[in-house]
Image (cartoon, rainbow, N blue to C red):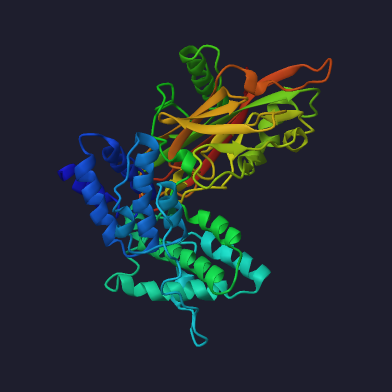
């Protein structure tokens, strides 16, 4: 019972990943025969005590996860325990087999004399992700509806929900003792208030101003706490991932370390290949090392010399290709990805083609921000109509024509609520092939296809823990 109380307390932590992991553990307890009764009772009490729409959605997500992953059958009393309804709470309720609840309770358009408060604009891009305000701003341009003003009004209205602490601290509480230049995913009460205001604004736009229901339900998905395909993805660090290495040396010594990583994958999984890897391998107060590498193919005569490939392809790290997701039902646990034409992937001068890209942000969960934007790898398959991504065990599998062509894993690599700003992420991620089908591409007759890894090592260092980190980037390629 003490474990249960601790887990429920952790749902109030301002660290998104901690809340996601806690929801996973609670869903597991809810679905386990020996702990279902006490966990269900505690979670129903928690649900009934929620004061904001976004808090209700996070609590309902636990029930949905337990039903989807462990066969949990929800209590018939579940709908009666919901104090704040929203488009997303109804989405989860209907998926669990219940009827949707009324949404037009206490709706009110912002009065003409309402003035937007300074704290509403002040939290944007800090404690609150800009995506919600930006989404409404774009919609406002098309519809001429006062959506931003309405969201600010809803923000002002829910301030009284927690009158003693409407903002509940800020990122600097965690970052200031670590020194300058720290950033990180952060989701405290301000974020929950903003998401709740966003969801209420969409309902106002539909019920009072006639915005089409299909539009508002699609936009509500931007406020999902989890990506349905990633909901049960757990930290799982492969044994071959480097822990430490001498990355202070020259390109040849770094290349030797990274070749060893590629060979370790091949030794552990004969016939498979490392497609992409990005992870911090050292995280201390004075020094951080982040290693990234991606598999490429070169087919044809290159205008770029081998020793100049790394500098020529430098922009790849900033603009990795993204595979667009194909629309599915909102809580479908499979994600379908479209393809990118080879003409958009091929670098003409070097005749080089990346074999890894990223999944798009179509159903991004705000509690899973540690995976975005640079840690959610998928293979860039050429000549396929669609790619399926599904969660199996603690990892993801990528399938083409029902055949698994790659699998993905991620793991926690250090720090906590914040990380040094120059790091592209505080978690690690890897994409490993199943066989070699993922790199089968059409090549012109007479063209030799070569395979290489483009690598980058980011070194952060400082002598005083109150200073910002100095950054050193090293990059290169090696052919295999």
User: Residue 45's image quarter?
Assistant: bottom left
Residue name at image x 21 percent, y 42 percent: 37
Residue 110 placement (x, y as % from top left):
49, 80
In-front residue for pair 459/157:
157
To which quarter of the image does residue 197 belong? bottom left
Does residue 331 lie above or below 266 as drawn? below
Q: Quadrant of the C terminus?
A: top right
Q: Quadrant of residue 252?
A: top right
Quadrant for the N terminus in the image = top left
Residue 103, horizontal then vertical, whole percent: 45, 66
Camera sees residue 38: yes
Viewed as shown, does residue 151 lie left or right of 386? left
Q: Residue furthest right?
A: 445
Task: Please state if 263 lies on the left or on the right of 179 as rendered.
Answer: right
Q: Position of residue 57 (x, y in %)?
A: 39, 55
Please name the residue shown 28% across and 53% down the image: 77
Q: Residue at x 34, y 46 (%)?
A: 63
């Amino acid at each position: 019972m003490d474990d249960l109380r601790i887990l429920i307390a952790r749902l109030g932590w301002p660290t998104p990943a901690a809340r996601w992991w806690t929801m996973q553990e609670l869903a597991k307890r809810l679905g386990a025969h020996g702990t279902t009764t006490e966990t269900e009772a505690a979670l129903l009490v928690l649900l009934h005590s929620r004061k904001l729409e976004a808090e209700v959605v996070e609590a309902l997500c636990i029930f949905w996860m337990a039903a989807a992953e462990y066969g949990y059958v929800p209590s018939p009393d579940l709908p009666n325990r919901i104090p704040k309804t929203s488009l997303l709470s109804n989405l989860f309720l209907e998926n669990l087999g219940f009827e949707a609840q009324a949404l037009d309770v206490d709706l009110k358009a912002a009065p003409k004399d309402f003035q937007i408060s300074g704290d509403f604009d002040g939290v944007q891009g800090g404690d609150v992700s800009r995506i919600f305000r930006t989404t409404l701003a774009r919609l406002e341009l098309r519809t001429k509806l006062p959506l931003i003003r309405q969201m600010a009004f809803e923000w002002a209205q829910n301030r009284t929900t927690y009158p003693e602490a409407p903002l509940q601290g800020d990122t600097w509480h965690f970052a200031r003792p670590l020194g300058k230049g720290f950033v990180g995913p952060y989701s405290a009460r301000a974020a929950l208030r903003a998401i709740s205001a966003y969801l209420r604004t969409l309902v106002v736009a539909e019920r009072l101003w006639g915005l089409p229901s299909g539009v508002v339900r699609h936009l509500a998905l931007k406020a999902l706490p989890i990506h349905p395909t990633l909901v049960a993805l757990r930290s799982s660090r492969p044994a071959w991932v480097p822990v430490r290495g001498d990355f202070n040396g020259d390109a040849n010594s770094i290349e030797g370390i990274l070749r060893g990583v590629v060979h370790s994958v091949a030794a552990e999984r004969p016939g498979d290949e490392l497609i992409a890897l990005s992870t911090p391998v050292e995280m201390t107060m004075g020094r951080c090392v982040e290693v990234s590498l991606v598999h490429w193919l070169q087919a044809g005569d290159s205008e770029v010399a081998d020793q100049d490939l790394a500098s020529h392809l430098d922009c790849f790290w900033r603009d990795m290709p993204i595979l667009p997701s194909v629309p599915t039902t909102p809580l479908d646990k499979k994600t379908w990805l479209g393809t990118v034409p080879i003409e958009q992937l091929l670098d003409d001068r070097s005749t080089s083609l990346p074999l890894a890209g990223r999944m798009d942000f179509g159903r991004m969960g705000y509690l899973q921000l540690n995976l975005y934007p640079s840690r959610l790898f998928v293979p860039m398959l050429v000549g396929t109509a669609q790619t399926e991504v599904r969660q199996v065990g603690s990892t993801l599998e990528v399938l083409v024509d029902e055949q698994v062509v790659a699998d993905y894993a991620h793991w926690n690599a250090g720090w906590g609520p914040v990380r040094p700003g120059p790091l592209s992420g505080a978690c690690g991620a890897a994409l490993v092939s199943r066989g070699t089908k993922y790199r089968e591409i059409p090549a012109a007759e007479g063209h030799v296809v070569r395979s290489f890894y483009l690598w980058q090592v980011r070194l952060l260092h400082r002598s005083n823990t109150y200073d910002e980190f100095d950054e050193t980037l090293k990059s290169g390629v090696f052919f295999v």
